Image: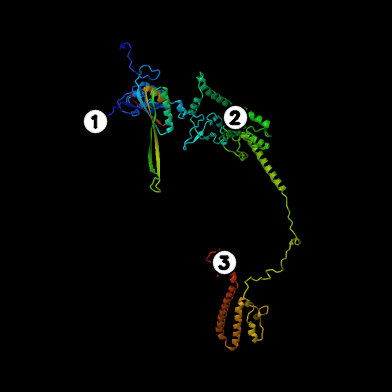
Amino acid sequence: MAAADVAYAPPMKSGKPGYEGGVLEPQHRIRITLSSRNVKNLEKVCGDLVTGAKGKKLRLKGPVRIPTKVLHITTRKSPCGEGTNTWDRFEMRIHKRVIDLVSTPDVVKQITSITIEPGVEVEVTISDA
Amino acid sequence: MGGRGGGRKPRNFATFRLFPRAGAADPNDRVFVRVDNNEYTVPGFADEDSFDPSQCDPTADAGHLHSASGPLPEHVRREILELGLPDDGYNYLSHLRELRPAAAAAASSFVPSSTARPEPLPLDVKAYDASRVRVGPAEGELDEGRTMCKVAAKTAPVRRIEKAVDPDVARLLDESDVSHAGSEDEGLEEDFVIVANRAEGEESEEAEEEDEEVEDGNGVFSDVEEEFDFEDDPKPRERRLLDEQFDLLALEEYGDSDDDDKGVKDGEYELPSEVIDELKLFHSQNACVDEEYRTPADFVRRKLESSTTDEVDESVHVIKKCAEYAEKYLNETAEEEEVVLVSESSDESEVWDCETIVSTFSNLDNHPGKIETPGIPKRRLPRVFPGENATTNDIIKLHGKERLPVEYLPQRKRGGEKEKKVKPAEATIGDKFKKGAEKETKEEKKARKAAVKEEKREARKAKKELKGLYKSETQKAQKVAAVTGPSSIRLM
């Protein structure tokens, strides 16, 4: 009734501490896709990113492990057609992890700039929050 | 699918991928690059670098340039020149790469080696070190016409070297090592070398003059010596008075009996002192001064000149002495010969000192028979003594020199023939008495042929006997041959 003098503050999610009433920059939904042939490195990068994001108090959806894609190549061992029909079976395993965040692009840049491991491909997709 | 087209989800997102920055030494230096074509913009992302791998425009600076059209902007040109690259309108900055400490640690940076090895020469190039070659100042000595004694006076030793470095390059390399702390005496630095060289040249000239005065007598030797100088370790200095004095001193201190050969190096050769004296006298007369070659005989035959009378005497003297020595030597050797007398032994002593008598028989008297296989026992004794046939005659005939009863002797091989011959002889003799001499030849022939036949028959018999006798041996041999020998051998 007589609530006009009180500034109407729309109900807001009391987020993280230090949250000062409205973000200076619009938050985006950011999806970081990490793919690699090397599981160890990939897991390491993943872990670093997650820890970085958690340190920045971002909303994080933990590393989602996409099923590994195995690419096969099956060829005859022999360069000519002679001999027992032996076949080589080569495979390449691609591992993929997906991390979802909600934050500003700058922060994401910061996070991704620190942790780098050779052989890990990082793709960042930014969308509207 | 018309409805499908309208209901497509709005693509309001942007995808960025991390790429390593071009020109960056560190592969970890990455930037976000947009990889989709949506119309969604993210203001705070990937704005700092306008890097786009699809466009090949590497740097922000390059973004200002037109690619290869028009001159480069001034600041770009200045930068290129500063780097030492040529100013030819091409933007070399696009090829620059950052050197980072991490990259350097990753062994991708250039570290100049402390032990620089110059490149080896290509195979078709030969390099010689001619830094030791003396050119110039020694010409004064050569003009005196001593060309005979100094063959190829201007040769100098040069050593072939494997690696040749340009002196300028070497100097630059050295300079880069030495830190020039901006010395104010730069002028002096460059000059003092020249000054020093000049000073040395003057010194050597002075020494040369002195040498000529002092060493007039030893002209030849000194020349020879200088040749030695060239041939030995290259010593570019002239022989000065000081060197002579040093040599003398050395000889005095450590030398042998010969103390007068200034021009001879120690240890090169040692002549007896008398010879040296003679030679010295000879050389002091400057025998090689003139162009024309002279023998002492020339002087003797009065082709001498007034200035060389002394020489004549000397040469004569020398020759005389040589002859004396030769004679003495010859006589000495003649006297020293010892006559070795070898006495011949007398007849008595010419007896064999050792006598070995094996037998008193000798081949001259005794003819040993040939060793043969044991013959047929029949042969030893004829079955029928021809003497028996001839008993009709009641005469035992003795034939031959020894007067032997030939018919009754054991005959040899030809004995058969003889036997047979004897028989027909007997027969013919017998026939003779009965028949005429004409038929002898026919019967003789018949008898002869019969005898031959008989002989052959007997030989066959003997062979058969022999075969039978040694059959066991052949069996053994066959056994052995079957094992070891070739199968072509047939023994039985």
CB of mark 2 within 8 Å of CB of mark 3? no
Residue B422, by quadrant, is bottom right
Of circles 1 and 2, the one toward us is 1
Mark closest to the chain's N terminus, 3 or 1: 1
Give the number of callouts.
Answer: 3
Q: How many neighbours does mark 1 have within 10 angstroms: few (below 14), some (14-19), or many (20 or more)?
A: few
Q: Which subunit holds the residue at mark 2? A: B
Residue B216, by quadrant, is top right
Residue B204, by quadrant, is top right
| Residue B3: image tag | 1
Judge whether residue B337 can be spotted in this image: yes
Viewer-proximal residue among B328 and B481 = B481
Identified by mark 1, the residue type is Gly
Q: How many neighbours does mark 3 have within 10 angstroms: few (below 14), some (14-19), or many (20 or more)?
A: few
Mark 3, residue position:
B479
Viewer-proximal residue among B336 and B359 = B359
Q: In this view, does B125 lie to the left or right of A12?
A: right
Name the spot of residue B146 as percent of width and height, x first.
57, 34
Q: How far apart are marks 1 and 2 (CA)?
A: 114 Å
Name the spot of residue B52 as percent of width and height, x first.
34, 27
Share a chain, discs 2 and 3?
A: yes
